[in-house]
Image: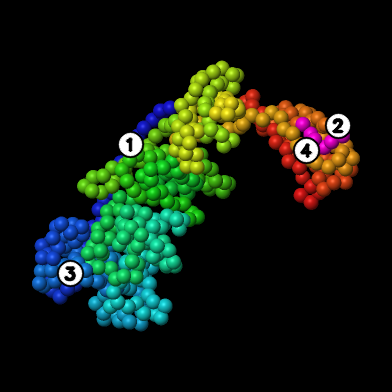
Amino acid sequence: MFIQKVKLTVVALAIAGSLLVSQASAEISSDFSDVPTTKHYASAVYELANRNIISGYEDGTFKSAASITRGQAAAIIAKLLKYDTKNVKDPKFKDVASSQWSYGAIAALANADVINGYGDGRFGPNDSITRAQMASILVKAFGFPPYYYSSSENPFTDTQRLASHQTTINILYKMGITSGTTPTTFSPNAPISRAQAAVLITKAEKVKASIVTLKAADYGWNSIYSYSSYHDQDNIIHTVASDKFNWEEIQLVPMREGTTTLSMTGSTRDPITGVDSHDDYRKYYVHVTKEDEQLKITLEESEDILTTEVLLSSSGEQVKNISLATMEGETIQQEVKLKSCDYHPLHAAPECFSIDDPGEYIATVQYASGKKARHAVAASVYKPSFYLSVHKLEEKPTFTIDLGGTADQFGEYVMPKGGEKIAIISRDKNSNRFHITGVSEGKLQIVFPNSKAAVDRFDIQVRKLGSIINVNASKQNEDY
């Protein structure tokens, strides 16, 4: 289904600014004798040098392996992001006097909660900054969105017990800013080298420039009620709310080239009644392309409804064939095309099929064993989503429940008035075995007023979708 497409291009602006790592009064050079262009970090080093951000030494070298101090790192970030280093509040670090050359930068970053000192009240401006500390500074300074991940997603075995830096390191990894010192190590406590710092800074700038922020206020919403890019199985974008609880904005981080979808609904509060409504929505195709080695997001607004995957409940047996018919029994497809389930990773076998149009269907599953099962499939349009809303129900028109024990333990049962309109019940002679046939949707509670057993009732639920009926029953006891 195609209704409308409107293109909205979001152009990411490069972050301007400069920073200075002072090495005496050496003149800036972009031709360092110890940084051949074949080095993997050369482009980052020369890019920052040509922007007058970093400098070399008087002898024409860059000394890529040399470390930088915490004070120098503060000065770098403050200059790069244009922090006000004059009008600052004293952070009261024991070892940072107001006369120190990096005082303004350290204070500005501390005021912005980008950096912290040690537990003993020192900042350690002359200490070499570690790779973990630099990771945390970059995440906070650039305002990268959080990424809530499980420990299994962290490839670095040497960061999994870091209480303060594990999350920020993983954010940089998730965004493609760092790949670690090896595929499985990050070396968090090692001093960061000048070359490593140059690489991280240039990559962080590019990622920051490519992030797209969607604000609720821009749509006339009080907040974003829900958003979804969960069908992005190729991990093309990372979508995250900037706040865990109050979604005033969401950020889209491009991860790799490709196209995926994003849908979101807004929450709008009536100023008189105070009641929230969630009627307004936006749907976008999210196109990620690469230009000049930088990823760029383009949003294309749409009202499309896409082909939707259907997975029927499986008995665990091998599926041989699925046929599709109308609810009235008219055949639509004698054999639908089965495929591996894209969005149900636990079902790698070809058990899924796709539907394009809303409606009510009967899907008949034939298993390799010869067994057959029928399912109702009701697909309806839910406008805020790119995909049809699918409800499924397996046909089980009858159900047998055996309460055990002897008939005289339970005595006679009582059915609620009008219960026969929901289900018809029969009981085997001199037993507590009951056969239930569903009639219409509803719930029943069958009670044994004179029961001497632990069980004094059982519940029946009848569900109906189109012409398909599903019956289930469960026994309850007096303490339930």
Q: In this view, does 309 lie above or below 153?
A: above
Q: Residue at x 38, y 40 (%)?
A: 260
The residue identified by callout 3 is 63
**Callout 4 secondary element:** strand
* Observer-nearest of 464 and 188: 188
The label on residue 402 is 4
Q: Residue at x 33, y 36 (%)?
A: 7
Q: In this picture, which residue range is highlighted in magenta? A: 429-435
Position of the N terminus, as image quadrant, is: top left
**Callout 3 secondary element:** loop
Q: Position of residue 43 (x, y in %)?
A: 18, 57
Tell whether 480 sits left or right of 222.
right
The residue identified by callout 2 is 429
Tell whether 356 sits left or right of 234.
right
Nearer to us: label 4 or label 1: 4
**Callout 2 secondary element:** loop
Q: Where is residue 98 in the image (x, y as percent from the top left)?
A: 29, 80
Between disc 2 and disc 1, whose residue precedes?
A: 1
The residue identified by callout 1 is 7
Between disc 3 and disc 1, whose residue precedes?
A: 1
**Callout 1 secondary element:** strand
